[in-house]
Amino acid sequence: MREKVIFFEVQGGSDKGADGYRPDTLPMVEALKIRGYDAEVIFFDSARKEQIFNYVSEHALAYVSRINPGNLKDEALYFDMLRELCATGVMGMPHPDAMIKYGAKDALVHLTDTPFVANDTYAYYTIAQFKEQFPQSLATGERVLKQNRGSTGEGIWRVAIEQPTTTTPLPLTTRIKCTEAKDNHVEYFDIGDFMTFCEQYIVGDNGMLVDMPFLSRIAEGEVRLLMLGDRPINVVHKKPATHADAFSATLFSGAHYRYDSPDDWRDLIDTFLDALPGIMARLGNYDLPLIWTADFILDTDDFGNDTYMLGEINCSCVGFTSQLELASDVAETIIHMLTKDVEIIA
């Protein structure tokens, strides 16, 4: 009999508390139990995949994925199991293909025809593509390169030419200044050597690099919308540290966080929600993830007006450990999704 909501975790990883769980998982489990729903946590292990699949397919109404893919030894096997569970009627929160579409960095490239993403945003899936295009895009101005893997700013580089030049594409000996978002540290390379260094981000499963314009108004802060389905429940204003090279909006790098009500950002939220159906269509028309975020950076349009540009979307395992009271909102959303599904089936 299906009666449970299963939360998937994986053992190990820097996102765990002293008890071995993500700090925001058990509060969601308890919030569901308070509301009369059975819920439990299962640690995914590729060696036990068949056993886990059989148990969940028999007992679960839905699963909630709380695994950072970077902590998985076999990401493809985990996603395959989630697809199989969805095929048996277990509700995916989110469906694995939605997790990929919304969570991969190249989601931005699929949105270049929207007002939120610059047209000169590129994705490189091969080393050849990267080495052909990047010297041309960097010649137009400062860029940000983002790897598809990693977290807390690792493998996200702000890249600038040291000396202005009108040469396009840039010679491979051009000196560049590279600042990594992980901790805002600076390294200097010839562009050819830097591209060789970045090959590590392209090779392997789900390897890619996204190349986008650097937005200098990041110094004013990044605005993160924390979404439950189609409802914004919280806004985090993340202001980078104030030293000259700082551009990272992560806590680890020294950014300052302020937590706001969605009502404080009504114009941005209304504009985003109006565009959301089109964004969903461009990202595969999947149901929206249960918990996800959209990050925005201020820019200035051709007429001198403020506009917000989308920096990235995250949905693989969005945390809210600084605001655990939001677990109640998550539980209510899960119940709404389950009961709405029952109504549709009926």
Image (cartoon, rainbow, N blue to C red):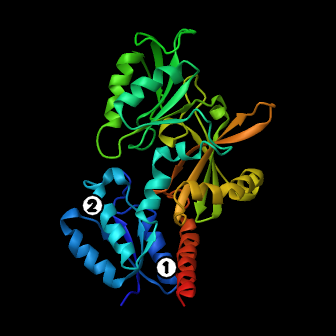
The tag on residue 77 is 2
Residue 225 position (above or below residue 228): above
Residue 40, position as x, y percentages in the image: 37, 76
Residue 304, position as x, y percentages in the image: 80, 31
User: In the rendered structure, are the residues bearing label 1 and label 2 in contact, judged by CB atoms less than 8 Å apart?
Assistant: no
Tell me which numbered mark, 1 or 2, is placed earlier along the sequence: 1
Q: Quadrant of residue 297?
A: top right
Say what amino acid the circle numbered 2 marks: Leu
Q: Is residue 1 left or right of residue 242?
A: left
Q: Residue at x 22, y 75 (%)?
A: 51
Residue 341 position (above or below residue 307): below
Residue 81 position (above or below residue 148): below
Q: Residue at x 35, y 36 (%)?
A: 202
Regarding residue 20, the answer to whether it shows in the image is no
Q: Residue at x 33, y 71 (%)?
A: 84
- Secondary structure beneath dot 1 equals helix
Say what amino acid the circle numbered 1 marks: Leu
The residue tagged 1 is: 32
Nearest to the eye among marks 1 and 2: give it.
2
- Secondary structure beneath dot 2 equals helix
Residue 171, position as x, y percentages in the image: 44, 11
